[in-house]
Amino acid sequence: MEVYFDNSATTKVLPAVADLVLKVMTEDYGNPSAKHGKGMRAEQYIKEAAEIIAGTLKVSPKEIIFTSGGSESNNMALTRTAIANKRAGNHIISTSIEHASVYNPLAYLEEQGFEVTYLPVDHDGHISLEDLENAIREDTILVSIMYVNNEIGAVEPVEEIAKRIKKKNPAILFHVDGIQAYGKFVIRPKRQGIDLLSVSGHKIHAPKGIGFLYVDSRVKIKPLIYGGGQQRGMRSGTENVPGIAGLGEAAREMYQNHGEKMKQLYELKDYMIKRLDEVEGTTVNSLRGELSAPQIVSASFSGVRSEVLLHALEDKGIYVSSGSACSSNHPAVSGTLKGIGVKQELLDSTLRFSFGVFNTKDEVDICIAALKELLPVLRRYQRG
């Protein structure tokens, strides 16, 4: 039996999504800029998807920009708002545990003369609101903080963060990387004070290569791609209609009976943590219950390198991650794990188990049984 516990890297596409994508690719394949019927039908898919997604966020469809995924959304949110608002200041605030698709655009902006303050986090992966307030300056134009950490599932208090930012200066823009949060949480940007929100489709059972950026209508932002003027000139190029349609359908399905879906995920996460407590030499880095995201459990296994354990589990048909697969397929020390104070000897001994709507408790039992079997053998082997 195959067990897939790497849903934070990517998810299996929902059947209804796959069916719709195939239909758009093989039947309704017109160019949405074309004036004939097939083009108009393709354009309708884009409109419908924008309306579905906007409905899940309670925003206007005109505030949704479709992108190629989370990395493009983060790049656009950061670089294009910073450049558009440079006259107001050149200071940006973020955290020490952001995804590479935030950290690297910020590094680029530093090369362009912007100054970035990186806030530390506590043992649970949360920033200090006092540190945030103290970091805000007269020339601060943008704050970027992830909603859910992709490695340990820490949930930042985005609404309270927004209040602190806007109290100091209402003109400061607040960008949220919502890539691990959308579909798992009910997000209301207008109410929560979020000006820009990045989302990736393949984290919510939509295809790869599609995502969106929510941009509040009041935000001053420049396009990332110039060309034929598609998407109101904000992202030129012929739209990925099959991907957009699939993303809309996935968003619809994820937010149907949403409370029940998340209840099941939280139960699965807590069950995994409970079972991991039975495994000798294991340290769980994620919080139980609603103090962290419902789909992510990080655990460190003393005396075994994560890559060795990952492949040993793979040999048994169990798929997990040793970190963020979105960053690179090359092993590296996790900035998140260092940031929350994981012991040095455990930094390279940590796995991430991440769940989706298809997973079950029986699969958790299979995984735990495999860990109990493998760990003593691998530890003896590594001790030589």
Image: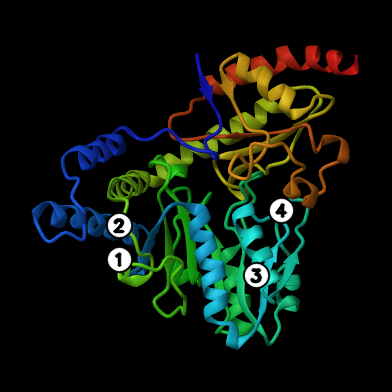
Q: Which residue is mark 3?
A: 109
Residue 86 appears at what percent x and percent y?
59, 83
**Residue at horizontal 67%, vertical 24%?**
310
Residue 349 appears at what percent x and percent y?
78, 31
Mark 4 vs 3: CB contact within 8 A: no
Task: Inspect this view and state whether residue 200 appears.
Answer: yes
Nearer to me, 253 or 97: 97
- Label 1 vs 3, first from the N-terminus: 3
Q: Is residue 278 above or below residue 31?
A: above
Query: What amino acid type should be assigned to the residue bearing mark 3?
Result: Leu
- Label 2 vs 3, first from the N-terminus: 3
Q: Is residue 245 left or right of residue 38?
A: right
**Residue at horizontal 78%, vertical 52%?**
339
Q: Which residue is mark 2?
A: 238
Rate crowding at label 3 as few (under 14), some (14 to 19) or many (20 or more) other CA atoms within 10 Å: some
Q: Which residue is mark 4?
A: 125
Query: What amino acid type should be assigned to the residue bearing mark 4?
Result: Gly
Query: What amino acid type should be assigned to the residue bearing mark 1?
Result: Gln
- Tell me how far mark 1 sits from mark 2, CA to CA: 7 Å
Q: Is residue 182 above or below residue 235?
A: above
Q: Nearer the viewer, mark 4 or mark 3?
A: 3
- Label 4 vs 3, first from the N-terminus: 3
Nearer to me, 67 or 277: 67
Q: Which residue is mark 1?
A: 230
Residue 53 appears at what percent x and percent y?
34, 57
